Image: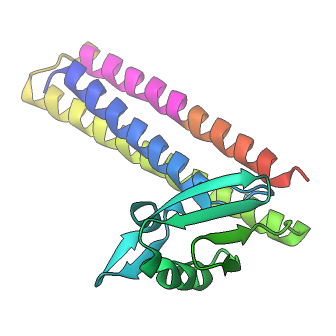
Amino acid sequence: MPADDILLDAEERMEKAVDVFRHALTGIRTGRANPGLVDSLRVEVYGSPTPIKALASVGAPEPNQIVVRPFDPGTIKDIEKAIQASDLGLNPQSDGRLIRITIPALSTDVRKKMTARIKELAEESRVAIRNVRRDGNKAADTEKTDGTLTEDDCESTKEEVQELTKKYEAKVGDLARAKEAEVMEQ
């Protein structure tokens, strides 16, 4: 595998790790309503777990309220049960056509737990990025022993993989700091 392929593979995998982190952050509650809070919930309907966004339109018309409009009114009770069963601590209210979810203000303890969770997720992403770095370095070493890469090319490839690692770890850090600030703002 040429050095360019090693670098391209490493960059793609690191980008995926950042995307997974970014997606995980949408499920973390802040002081204001965000449709991403319930997007990832799965509802047991039609015999299989289905994402809420496949069953209903989800919006946030007010800063402290999420509105879920089911496409099929028959699924409203199932959606309501899924929201109550989630660990989000939300209390949905239904009027038979749509579900309103009022987002309560976060207490200081809850805010601290949320920032701790953000830090955990960020560290998991950094570990994933470092694992990609390890794989890239291992691929470069393998190519060197096979004679495909020279020693200088191997070292420069490893340096470029390290630069990618720093770049993507910085992205994770920036995303984490922004989300922590959002959670801690009152």
Q: Nearer the viewer, residue 155 or 18?
A: 18
Give the quarter of the image for residue 80. bottom right
Q: Position of residue 41 (x, y in %)?
A: 49, 70
Give yes or no for residue 22 being in the magenta stretch. Answer: no
Give yes or no for residue 158 being in the magenta stretch. Answer: yes
Give the quarter of the image for residue 143. top left
| Magenta part, dominant SS | helix
- Residue 148, compared with residue 73, is above or below; it is above
Q: Quadrant of the N terminus?
A: top left
Residue shown at 69% from the left, 79% from the top? 93
- Residue 73, compared with residue 170, is above or below; it is below
Q: Position of residue 60 (x, y in %)?
A: 68, 54
The stretch in magenta equals: 153-168
- Residue 99, compared with residue 4, is above or below; it is below
- Residue 109, compared with residue 169, is above or below; it is below
Question: Taking 121 as reference, is 60 left or right?
Answer: right
Residue shown at 64% from the left, 79% from the top? 94
Residue shown at 30% from the left, 35% from the top? 136
Q: Position of residue 167 (x, y in %)?
A: 53, 27
Indicate how the structure is coloured in the image.
Answer: rainbow
